[in-house]
Amino acid sequence: MSTERKASASASASLGRSLRGATPRLTDLASTPESPRTPLARTATSFYGSPGGYRSEEEYIVLELGARFVRGGLPGDSTPRCTLSFGPEEQRRAGDYRQWDPGHSSQRRKRRRGHGWGQDHELYRLDVSQADLGLVEDKFERAMREAFNKYFVLDTKPRRVMLAIPPKMPHPLISTMLDVLFGSFQSPSVTLLSSPVVATVAAGLRSALVVDIGWAETVITAVCEYREVHERRTVRAGKLMSEEMAKVLNAALDNEADAGAPPANLSFEEADEVLTRVGWCKAKPRTTRRSTYSAARSSLIAEEFEDAAEAPEPTIAVPFPRHTPPTDVEVPFSTLAQPAESALFAPDTALCEFDDHEWPVHHAMYRALLSLPMDVRRLCMSRIVITGGGSALPGLKARILDELESLVSQKGWDPVRSYGSASARHERIMSQKRENLQLRSEEGEDKVPDSLGPDPPLPAGLQKPEEDPIDAKLSHLSLKNTPSASLIGGVIRGVDTLGAWAGASLVAQQRIKGIVEIEREKYLQHGIQGATREKEISVVPQRQSMGPAVVGRGAGDRASWTLGVWA
């Protein structure tokens, strides 16, 4: 045993001497070749690892809150890590194993008595007079725990939250969400961001007309230099489209059913699935005046193909596995476009029959633009951002822009609805003005006189303004440092956006401080009533000394917090 111990001790000593001799010196490190390193200025995206950093207490969690979903992720990501919905399957109690029943998927769920259409799939409703805020809190907390434990996979340190919510959200709902974030997850602070503003950021713009086609309503917000300047709302949104789709499918099932059978009553899940999968929107029918050549050519084509057989209307087979008995119904493909047209545009209803909260989407957009100042309107009308869950319907964005452009060409930007006894004269002047503009565009401006014949000249508001040489010189100088995209204005133009969550992720990554930044200690002490009524906070630096024994706060310090646009 002693011989073996001496042998092992000598082997360990020789190994230690060899390791000490192999240790490189400082001079050797400089000449030793190394593997390539990532530059310090370049950071890997948080999708491949935990968002660690030198100051982990400033890391954010980016959330987007909607009526039927919660999106969550980390700053710097282009897409959220999770999108959690609030259906009945996500609200099962412990011990509820009905989803593993073989016949559960083929059973049609009936709506609860007293519940509205799709209410079981909602997180909240804007009408909080009859809402159960305790249930809303439990739903939101359960979704957040699932997001933190299953998708974020972070350490136990509390994280700041960047929360994008719709504008004009009621205070009880905001308080409920803040209670969950501050109480259950110990967030140091919560920054509230307006969804239209961050959608504008995600589109790469500073000013835009954001049309958010959501679940319960469509919100049209004019954003100028990252500030909300005007807003209009209409109830024509995804919920109304889902109800119209259910009516179309119920009518198709009743036509295929036998005589005396009970009327079909589709569930929300069936109608929503058909709307999501095969729903679409028709293009706007163009009614333009044809020239003589076009009319002759059309008549020649009609005579050539008058004997040709008309192509049958395409149909699509829609399965209904939860119907009694399960069946497949052949539905014309054009019929699947009726819900979007009747719900959002209402072409068969006169405008005098609409209330202020149920205007068609294109009319609400036109009125929002008409209410803006001229310079803001010029920026917003050429930067129309259509977002929201309902905007994913194929053909819907192009239809909205076409309808808005048709309204502008017909009515112009005159806010006067009726001229009374001068209506005939005003219409004659406007028709002559339109003809002159059309001739100028076709034949050139030099060949068309500005006079209108025997009629008096146009009013000052309709005349072409005089060119100021100073303004022309300033605009010429601004072309050198201004991108060409920011100079586009005065035309109807749509711009794509990555969504509100992507804009909030970009804002969080750039460490931009929001106006509505709520600290945990102040909120737990005073609640949401501790917010001031100031909607803006001045960022102009103030003097540090304002007299003896009076010290002013810095530009970034705040004595209290504000709710901003939600106040």
Image (cartoon, grey):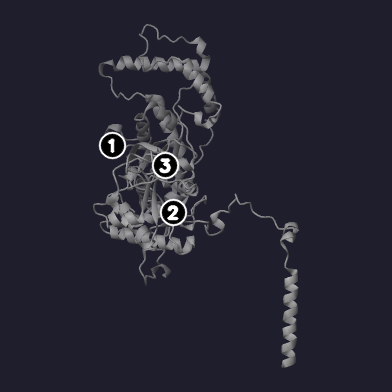
Pointer 1 or 3: first along the chain: 3
Q: Residue at x 51, y 19 (%)?
A: 473
> Callout 2: 10 Å neighbours few (<14), some, many (20+)?
many
In this view, the mark in front (2 or 1):
2
Question: Which label is found at residue 71?
Answer: 2
- Mark 1–mark 3 CB contact (< 8 Å): no
Question: Which label is found at residue 197?
Answer: 3
Q: Residue at x 53, y 23 (%)?
A: 477
Q: Is residue 284 left or right of residue 129?
A: right
Vertical order, 332 against 473 (above or below)? below
Q: Position of residue 455 (x, y in %)?
A: 36, 8
Vertical order, 222 against 50 (above or below)? above
Q: Position of residue 138 (x, y in %)?
A: 33, 62
Q: Amino acid at mark 3?
A: Val
Q: How many marks?
A: 3
Secondary structure found at label 1: loop
Residue hosting label 1: 356
Q: Amino acid at mark 1?
A: Asp
Using the numbered discs, state the Cα–Cα distance from disc 1 to disc 3 in whole angstroms: 24 Å
